[in-house]
Image (cartoon, grey):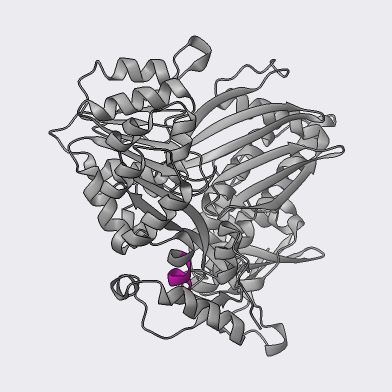
Amino acid sequence: MVKSQNEEIKSEEKIDWEHLKIPAEVIKIVPYEAAKKYRFIPFEKDGKVLRVAVTDMDSMEVQNALQFLAEKNRLSVEMIPVSEKDFESALISYTSPAFSIQQALETIGEEERPSEEKKEETEDDITIEEAPVAKIVEVILRNAIEGSASDIHIEPLEDSVRVRYRLDGILHNSLVLPKKIGPAIVSRIKILSNLKIDERRKPQDGRFRITESKKQIDLRVSTLPVSMGEKVVMRVLDKEKGLLELDQLGVVGKNYDIIKKSIFEPYGMILITGPTGSGKSTTLYSILGILNKEGVNIITLEDPVEYAIEGINQSQVKPEIGYTFASGLRSILRQDPDIVMVGEIRDTETAELAVHAALTGHVVLSTLHTNDSLGAIPRLIDMKVEPFLVASSLRAVVAQRLVRKICLDCREEVKMNESARKEIENVLSQIPEAEKKAHGFTGEIKIWKGKGCPKCGGQGMKGRIGIFEVFYMDEAVNELLSGKVDEEKLRQIAAKQGMITMKQDGILKVLKGSTALEEVERVTDEGFLEID
């Protein structure tokens, strides 16, 4: 039986659709796909009465669907009018991974019991049958993509399986699943990634592609045997997010000018440095996007290929068959390249080959693990590259870190004490006026934070931006490298160049309201912050 409540809902019964928590037993009655199609949502069950929010009370299609629903579940359905805006707010409950996964787990439980003979399904049946384990994996992936997670961690614990997402560089707990379902989830991911299901003793690497919201998303998969089972980490690779302009990454002012000038030199090496997860690959892809023209031959050597770029020849190393960065680079140089990108310089052989390529008329892009831009020079020398070869081949070194951005929807000013203000003023005094202007500094010293809102999931932070320092090779550096390398003298030369340090770049982004002081302190290890 279906009846409508067309009268205005009494004030004491008014419903906060945005923060509505729909019980799992109610969500079970109507699948998400059906709720979205017919634009109605069951939100409350009182005995045999099911209350349903409906956007179009007069639709015969909706009424027929609700009539079918009432008969199937032996319920009386009460329709409540709801606006499109409130409907969309309530629909969020249906996309909650916890609810979806709970439904799948209950299905598994039912499958373990002797099943009753199923009635033949008709076209009128609005329920959707899905394999429960596949559904759980689908929900985990969809939730990661919709939440803009960069990585998904599925970790076996002693009595459960934990799912964590890395959001803006920070791992967050998301789901806790029963221990028994863990192996099935891992097997499902292995099938998608073309990995060996029965190999649980050794790590495996693979990848697969899914389509979500009309976008193709690549997922890079790594499995690792641990004491409690197998751990899976999936890197989410969204091509649209991977190809950003330099200014979108946070490269502005003098740093931007040096990079643009260096990459358009006829030959030479440009290095991107920083720890794992600092955005080095993203910066490289951004530079490749600038250089990718019809008249040049660009070849990359990567481990692995993260984003496919049209017009660029991308090759993936396979160390297990002897195809390493070093051997691959030798082969690449026989392919008549103009520009070569090497994913990482890890050893002496690769370093020497990269330098040789830079000296023989090629633009070489690569990454190196160092703490700052100046550290790249002694690092190359430690790899047995002669100092005079470093001087001749190296054009610029970009060091970077990623900081979380303040959510603009809940940003608010934070009070500073006097010592913090003086420290910021001291940093500003060392920065040229042109650089302050390029960063949008107005002269007003204010700092901000996000207090947390629905748009940022209560975190106060949403998205990330880079802070950079760029060191370029000039005559003074070349002269220094003709003798013994002195890092202190390198710093003096950098200061004379007017190099903007990561700390300075970070402070300018703080004063613009892009990030928080705590974020700059976190990634630069600078203990200079005091906030009231």
Can you give x and y, in whole percent of width and height, for residue 259 in the image?
29, 50
Q: Is residue 396 magenta?
A: no
Type of secondary structure dominating the magenta stretch: helix
Can you give x and y, in whole percent of width and height, for residue 232 in the image?
66, 33
At x 23%, y 32%, the residue is: 311
Find residue 478 and report its image quarter: top left
Does residue 213 appear anywhere in the picture? yes
- Which quarter of the image is occupied by the N terminus? bottom right
- Which quarter of the image is occupied by the C terminus? bottom right
Can you give x and y, in whole percent of width and height, for residue 124 in the image?
56, 45
Find residue 225 and report its image quarter: top right
Q: Magenta segment, which residues?
A: 506-510
At x 73%, y 17%, the residue is: 201
At x 54%, y 41%, the residue is: 123
Q: Is residue 426 above or below residue 104?
A: below
At x 27%, y 43%, the residue is: 289
Does residue 238 appear anywhere in the picture? no
Q: Is residue 92 above or below residue 424?
A: above
Nearer to the camera, 87 or 451: 451
| 209 horizontally vs 225: left or right | left
Q: Is residue 56 above or below residue 310?
A: below
Q: Please identify the residue farthest to the front as the structure is shown.
A: 483
Nearer to the camera, 330 or 92: 330
Can you give x and y, in whole percent of width and height, for residue 390 in the image?
35, 34
Q: Please identify the residue farthest to the bottom as the structure is shown.
A: 11
Nearer to the camera, 477 or 34: 477
